Image (cartoon, grey):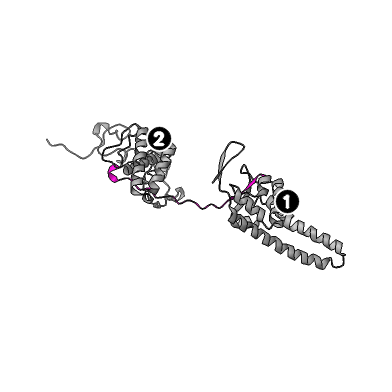
Amino acid sequence: MSELVTGEAVALELRPARLPSRALAVLLDLVVAVAAYVVVTIALVAATASLDEAAQFAVSIATFVLLLVGAPIAVETLSHGRSLGKLACGLRVVRDDGGPIRFRHALVRGAIGVVEILMTFGVIACIASLVSSRGRRLGDVFAGTLVVRERVPAARTGFLPPPPPWLAGRFSELDLSAVPDGLWLAVRQYLTRMHQLDPQVGWAMAERLASDVAARTGTPLPQGVPPTAYLAAVLQERQTREVRRAFGNGAVAGHAPTAPYEPRPAVPSYEPRPAVPSYESRPAVPSYESRPAAPADSPRAMPADAPPAERPASGATGKARPTGFVPPA
């Protein structure tokens, strides 16, 4: 791994390509270029058969320069450092600061590559790449470039052993703000690789890391707690706090909090109402004026249960109408 510092003072960690991968990429590029050169040369020989030897020699030199020198420069410029061989091997040419190359970088690399690769069959390029700490040949040194690996195998994340159940929540009140990130990284790397270490070396390393963590927290190491279990419990407590800080207090480790389930009120089913007859379909009720007036002496004029004092006198004389009832003597 090589660390490059950009113009903005940002450190970049790049993996330089070594001699075997670079040699394979150059070999693939040369095979493609030579095949294209042979095909174009045969076509030009058939097309320039009527020319003299000087013209044929000039055409052959121009074809050599264009296909074996100009073509790689054009391909690296247009593809930003990815030729066919480098693309197949997962390599790329970048500047010393990690940025993409331009035409002048590709031109310098291609011009010097004619001498150290084509004319010397790659001997000078191999020696320079073996001597350089970052595997650079002379063309890279003069152009200020570096060939790096783009497809880096991802490192497998080791399994973090969980703490014992009887330590769950025991360090919830522990102050972990003073523990630096470098110490947390060392604890994590130890827990993921402790099974690969010698038992005595692993135990001594666990005791040292546990004492460092306890000193940073200001709380001594609990009695009867193994250092490995202590480190696993403290690391799990830190991860739990990070999850709570990111997702809230109700979050579970590794999952965001979800809203509680609330049942929805039942929606009553739709029942069609009976049709109401329209106004025109109802029977007409006669108005008050259309009813015939009852005569004054009609028994329907007053209710039958009205008292005698309130009954109106019948006739024009105002005499009471005989009823035929004779009171007893």
Residue 295 visible, this angle? no
Q: Residues within 10 Å of mark 1 (few under 14, many from 20)?
A: some
Q: Amino acid at mark 1?
A: Ala
Lateral position of residue 173 relative to residue 21, left or right: left
Q: Amino acid at mark 2?
A: Val
| Residue named by callout 1 | 111
Q: Nearer the viewer, residue 202 or 216?
A: 202
Give me the residue at 82% from left, 60% from top: 59
Residue 120 spot, x, y in % from top left: 70, 56
Q: Residues within 10 Å of mark 2 (few under 14, many from 20)?
A: some
Tag 2 secondary structure: loop
- Which residues are drawn in magenta? 143-167
Label 1 vs 2, first from the N-terminus: 1
Tag shown at residue 48:
none
Report which quarter residue 54 is drawn in: bottom right
Report which quarter residue 61 is drawn in: bottom right
| Residue named by callout 2 | 179
Residue 267 spot, x, y in % from top left: 38, 48
Give me the residue at 72% from left, 53% from top: 115
Residue 130 visible, this angle? yes
Q: Nearer the viewer, residue 296 or 255?
A: 255
